[in-house]
């Protein structure tokens, strides 16, 4: 599998099998890639030169990664195991267990410091990374959870599902959803927040939709990858351009500046009426892509979690910001 970085620049034979997830790390200007061959590769993002490779980083294929801070990131595999990595260390520094099927998406929440994870086992997980402790887990939603986003000033957690519903949880009450957003005819594979009231969704029907949250309503369409499912979504820091990837082997860039024209048009009365119940405000950082890695793979009978042990030293400054 080749990783194409920019036009005319690529890393040949980066992995022996498909490359399922990539992310940039600020530390040491690194590019990290995870593969179905269970390996991690850390490359120089300017030259593509390999800095380090971790063979057998997981016992099953790596499908999803997300950055935590400048030096650390998490990986999720087909069996539901999550690992926390520090580029200054040779091995994973934490191992998070709880999911029993593939990890489809991550969201790192800066305040309070929590990692949200969705899985093909139908649950939403909430982890505290400093101690490697699971803080909460939803009941089985009887539907694969494929994507996750944080809305309404951190009060609402949205999860895209295989059935096309978007399940909504209130922060701090993760046991079961308390609202649903219908309207997608097929699975919601990618979610990315535009603002606190608007989310962009990528579906397996190939359409990118604009969705209003509380009150819930599909407002329109950004564009589509004809006949191919949307796999990932990304957005620029100024929220003017949206990027989408699909099984049609293309990356498309969409001008979404028109969405800014509607900002601030709601009345104070409407805002008060739609305001959810007060909970602890939180901030979130989107993962490198908003979509599910390997969401249509067959379920595996996971090995006993007790067999998966990590042994690694921890860099002295690793937990300073966690």
Image: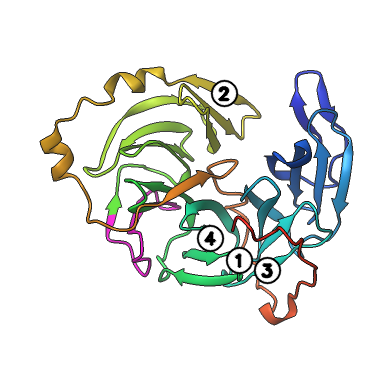
Q: Nearer the viewer, mark 3 or mark 1?
A: 1
In which quadrant of the rendered view does residue 93 lie? bottom right
Q: Total number of numbered labels?
A: 4
For marks 4 and 3, give the CA distance: 16 Å
For marks 1 and 2, give the CA distance: 37 Å
Q: Sequence order check: which comes first, mark 1 or mark 2?
A: 1
Q: Is residue 147 left or right of residue 82?
A: left
Image quarter of the N terminus: top right
Residue at image point 56% right, 69% down: 99
Q: Sequence order check: which comes first, mark 2 or mark 4?
A: 4
Q: Sequence order check: which comes first, mark 3 or mark 2?
A: 3
Q: Disc 1 on helix, strand or loop?
A: loop
Residue at image point 66% right, 29% down: 249
Residue at image point 24% right, 26% down: 264
For marks 3 and 1, give the CA distance: 11 Å
Which label is found at residue 130? 1
Task: Let me know if residue 177 is in the magenta part.
Answer: yes
x and y percentages locating residue 214 in the rendered image: 24, 44
Q: Residues within 10 Å of mark 4 (few under 14, many from 20)?
A: many
Which label is found at residue 31? none
Q: Please state the extent of the stretch shown in magenta in the rendering.
A: 158-179
Along the line of sight, the residue nearer the viewer: 162 or 107: 107
Q: Disc 2 on helix, strand or loop?
A: strand
For marks 3 and 2, give the CA distance: 35 Å
Tag 3 residue: 95
Q: Is residue 215 left or right of residue 242?
A: left
x and y percentages locating residue 118 in the rendered image: 51, 58
Residue contact between numbered discs 2 and 4, judged by CB atoms under 8 Å: no
Tag 4 residue: 119
Residue contact between numbered discs 4 and 3, judged by CB atoms under 8 Å: no
Along the line of sight, the residue nearer the viewer: 20 or 154: 154
Q: Nearer the viewer, mark 1 or mark 4?
A: 1
């Amino acid at each position: 599998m080749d990783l194409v970085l920019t036009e005319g620049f690529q890393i040949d034979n980066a992995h022996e099998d498909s490359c399922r997830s990539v992310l940039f790390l600020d530390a040491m200007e690194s590019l990290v890639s995870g593969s179905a061959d269970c390996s991690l590769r850390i490359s120089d993002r300017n030259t593509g030169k390999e800095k380090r490779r971790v063979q057998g980083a997981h016992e099953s294929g790596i499908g999803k990664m997300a950055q935590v801070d400048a030096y650390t990131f998490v990986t999720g595999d087909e069996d539901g195991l999550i690992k926390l990595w520090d580029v200054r260390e040779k091995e994973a520094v934490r191992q998070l267990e709880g999911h029993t099927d593939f990890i489809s998406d991550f969201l790192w929440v800066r305040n309070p410091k929590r990692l949200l994870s969705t899985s093909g086992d139908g649950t939403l997980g909430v982890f505290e990374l400093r101690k490697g402790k699971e803080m909460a887990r939803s009941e089985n939603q009887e539907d694969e959870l494929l994507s996750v986003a944080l809305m309404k000033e951190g009060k609402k957690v949205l999860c895209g599902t295989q059935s096309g519903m978007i399940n909504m949880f209130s922060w701090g009450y993760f046991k079961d959803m308390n609202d649903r957003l219908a309207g997608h005819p097929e699975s919601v594979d990618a979610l990315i927040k535009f603002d606190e009231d608007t989310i962009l969704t990528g579906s397996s029907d190939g359409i990118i939709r604009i969705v209003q949250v509380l009150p819930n309503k599909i407002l329109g369409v950004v564009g589509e990858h004809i006949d191919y499912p949307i796999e990932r979504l990304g957005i620029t820091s100024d929220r003017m351009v949206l990027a989408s990837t699909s099984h049609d082997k293309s990356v498309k860039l969409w001008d979404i500046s028109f969405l800014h024209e509607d900002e601030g048009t709601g009345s104070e009365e409407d805002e008060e009426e739609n305001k959810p119940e007060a909970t602890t405000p939180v901030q979130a950082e989107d993962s490198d892509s908003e979509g599910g890695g390997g969401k249509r793979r067959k379920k595996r009978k996971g090995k006993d979690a007790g067999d998966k042990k990590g042994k690694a030293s921890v860099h002295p400054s690793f937990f300073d910001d966690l």
